[in-house]
Structure formats: structure tokens, C-alpha cells
Image (cartoon, rainbow, N blue to C red):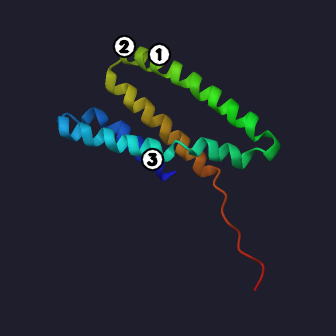
Amino acid sequence: MSGLLAYAVLLGSLPLVSHPFALGLWSLAMGLAAGFVGSLPTAFIGDRVGSPLHGVAVGWLRTMTDGGQILGPIVMGAVADAMHIPVTFLLASALLVTIAWRCHRHVVTPTASLEP
């Protein structure tokens, strides 16, 4: 969850960065954050779906993420055209915070052992 929140903060604050060197550092940090949280959906699916359905579930996840990568820029372009380009970054940040919050609600907490 903290990785998603860090990614959301980086993404949401990107419109505030104007110096080329800072923009390069921000881009590197966003790439690191994306790489860190990139495996979360697959791990989440693996935890929630039974072993016989792992292949189907991960295949479905990959299909949907591919669709999102096609539709995402179209939607964000429309938002940027209708409003202003920084709004797209804030919208993406809000989406990441929402996902982080939903993941936090599903965290399994370890139970104390009954053995002495």
C-alpha cells in the first residue's frame, strides 16, 4: 500500500516540477515506484484465486490491463482537452490512492499462534 501511495504522491506532484533536472529525478522515482508496485495485481490475484484458476485469472488480468493501457491515454487526453493537463495527473493520483485504500482494506493480518 505504501508503494501505491508514494507513486500517487509522485504522480500528483509532477505538474509542480519545472526544472529539467528535477523532472529527470521525478521521472526516475516514478519509474522505480511503478516497478515496485507493478507486480502487486498479479500477486493479489494469486492470493485470491485457487491454484487451478491461476492461469485464467492472470490471463484475464493481463487482458484487462492491456485494455486499460489502450483506453487510459484516450481518456486522459479527453480530460486534458476538456480541463487542463495537470488535472490528468491529479485524476491518476486519486485513482492510485483509491486502489491503495482498497488494498489496505483487504490486507490479511496474521493471527496470534495458539501454541505456547
**Relative to the observer, which residue lies in front, 56 or 8?**
56
Mark 3 surroundings within 10 Å by alpha-carbon count, few (fewer than 14), some (14 through 19), many (20 or more): some
Q: Amino acid at mark 3?
A: Leu
Nearer the viewer's eye, disc 3 or disc 1? Answer: 1
Residue 82, position as x, y percentages in the image:
38, 13
**Residue drawn at 42 percent across, 45 percent down:** 33
Residue 99, position as x, y percentages in the image:
55, 40
Label 2 – label 3 distance at C-alpha: 27 Å
Q: Amino acid at mark 2?
A: Asp
User: Going from the N terminus, do you reach mark 2 or mark 3 first?
Assistant: 3
Image position of 16 (left or right of 66): left
Q: Relative to residue 26, is residue 1 depicted above or below?
A: below
**Relative to the observer, which residue lies in front, 13 or 22?**
22
In the rendered structure, are the residues bearing label 2 and label 3 in contact, judged by CB atoms less than 8 Å apart?
no
Can you identify the residue that label 3 sits on? 5
Can you identify the residue that label 1 sits on? 74
Label 1 – label 2 distance at C-alpha: 11 Å
Image position of 39 (left or right of 78): right
Residue at the far front: name it: 55
Mark 2 surroundings within 10 Å by alpha-carbon count, few (fewer than 14), some (14 through 19), many (20 or more): few
Label 3 – label 1 distance at C-alpha: 24 Å
Q: Secondary structure at mark 2?
A: helix
Residue at the far bottom: name it: 116
Residue 45, position as x, y percentages in the image:
68, 43
